Amino acid sequence: MKKLLILSLVFAGAAMAAEQSVRIDVREQQQKARIVDGVVDGELTKRETAKLAAGQRHVKALESRAKADGHISVAERVKLEAAQDRQNGKIYQQKHDAQERK
């Protein structure tokens, strides 16, 4: 009985870790789509697009480092989500400023 309980806890933990990884990836894809929409709609200048792309690369690098050991710890997840929050704010700010692509 104890072995069954331990195995179920291990599998539950693995499932939660995989879910967090998927959530991070989905959010990253949504942010990329928002940047592309901003370019298509003329809301982002070339310079803004380049800066936002650099921010996306930074978040991706953080994610790669966090996943390097096979799982993302709580501290790594908090740091990664904070970076994604900052990037999200930057995307919003650049898309809604008065500058337009010429």
Image: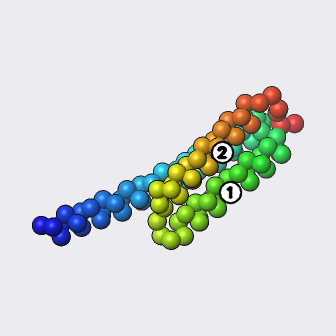
Which quadrant, please, contains the N terminus?
A: bottom left
Which percent across, then down, holds residue 65?
59, 66
Give the tally of numbered discs: 2
Q: Is residue 41 visible?
A: no
Color style of the picture: rainbow
Q: Residue at x 51, y 56 (%)?
A: 75
Circle 1: residue type: His
Residue farthest to the left, as pictured: 1
Which percent across, then down, holds residue 31?
62, 45
Q: Residue at x 57, y 53 (%)?
A: 80
Secondary structure category for the residue under label 2: helix
Residue 86 lies left or right of residue 46; in this view the side is left
Residue 76 lies left or right of residue 7; in this view the side is right
Residue farthest to the front, as pictured: 75
- Is residue 7 positioned above or below 47 on the image? below
Which percent across, then down, holds residue 43?
76, 35
Q: Which one is earlier in the sequence, the residue at label 1 or at label 2?
A: 1
Q: Is residue 62 visible?
A: yes
Q: Which residue is drawn at 30% across and 65% down?
A: 10
Residue farthest to the top, as pictured: 98
* Residue underneath mark 1: 58
Measured Cα–Cα span from mark 1 to mark 2: 10 Å
Secondary structure category for the residue under label 1: helix
Q: Foreground residue, 18 or 7?
A: 7
Q: Are marks 1 and 2 in contact (CB under 8 Å)?
A: yes
Q: Report crowding for label 1: few under 14, some 14 to 19, many 20 or more residues within 10 A (C-alpha).
A: some
Residue 33 lies left or right of residue 94; in this view the side is left
Q: Residue at x 58, y 47 (%)?
A: 82
Q: Report crowding for label 2: few under 14, some 14 to 19, many 20 or more residues within 10 A (C-alpha).
A: many
Which percent across, then down, holds residue 58?
68, 57
Circle 2: residue type: Gln
Residue 87: assigned label: 2
